[in-house]
Image (cartoon, rainbow, N blue to C red):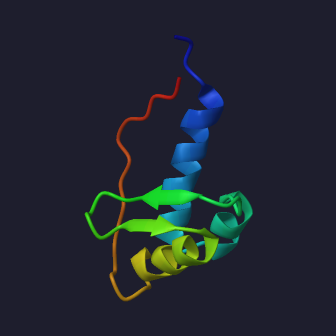
Amino acid sequence: MKRSQEIEQFMRDLVAALERGDSAFMERTTSRAPGVVSIGSDPDEYARDYERIMSLFNESTPQGPLHIHVRLTEVRGP
């Protein structure tokens, strides 16, 4: 399987946006399609639909109530 530099870079950009609390990036890149789902690393980090995903993002930034910090050490995309 050939690696995707685009997917790998997007994941780096996504983590950086989360760390910055960059809601504009998340709004631009999160699907609004019916059935969209976001799954985090915590069992409570499951959101279905755009509005709930954005709410979870805003809660999860370092500036939000959950004060989450993220670090990405390795990413590989098919």
- Residue 62, can we see it? no
The image quarter containing residue 71 is bottom left
Q: Percent position (x, y) of residue 76? A: 45, 28
Residue drawn at (43%, 82%) of the image? 59
Residue drawn at (60%, 72%) of the image? 22
The image quarter containing residue 44 is bottom left
Q: Percent position (x, y) of residue 70? A: 36, 60
Number of marks present in the image shown: 0
Among all residues in the image, which is located at the extreme top? 1
Q: Percent position (x, y) of residue 62? A: 40, 78
- Residue 25, can we see it? yes
Among all residues in the image, which is located at the extreme front? 34
Residue 46 or residue 7, whichever sits in front:
46
**Is 66 positioned to the left or the right of 61 in the image?**
left
**Is 26 positioned to the left or the right of 63 in the image?**
right
Residue drawn at (58%, 51%) of the image? 13
The image quarter containing residue 6 is top right
Name above or below for residue 46 compared with residue 57: above
**Is 51 positioned to the left or the right of 12 in the image?**
right
Name above or below for residue 49 compared with residue 5: below
Residue drawn at (41%, 75%) of the image? 60
Name above or below for residue 64 compared with residue 41: below
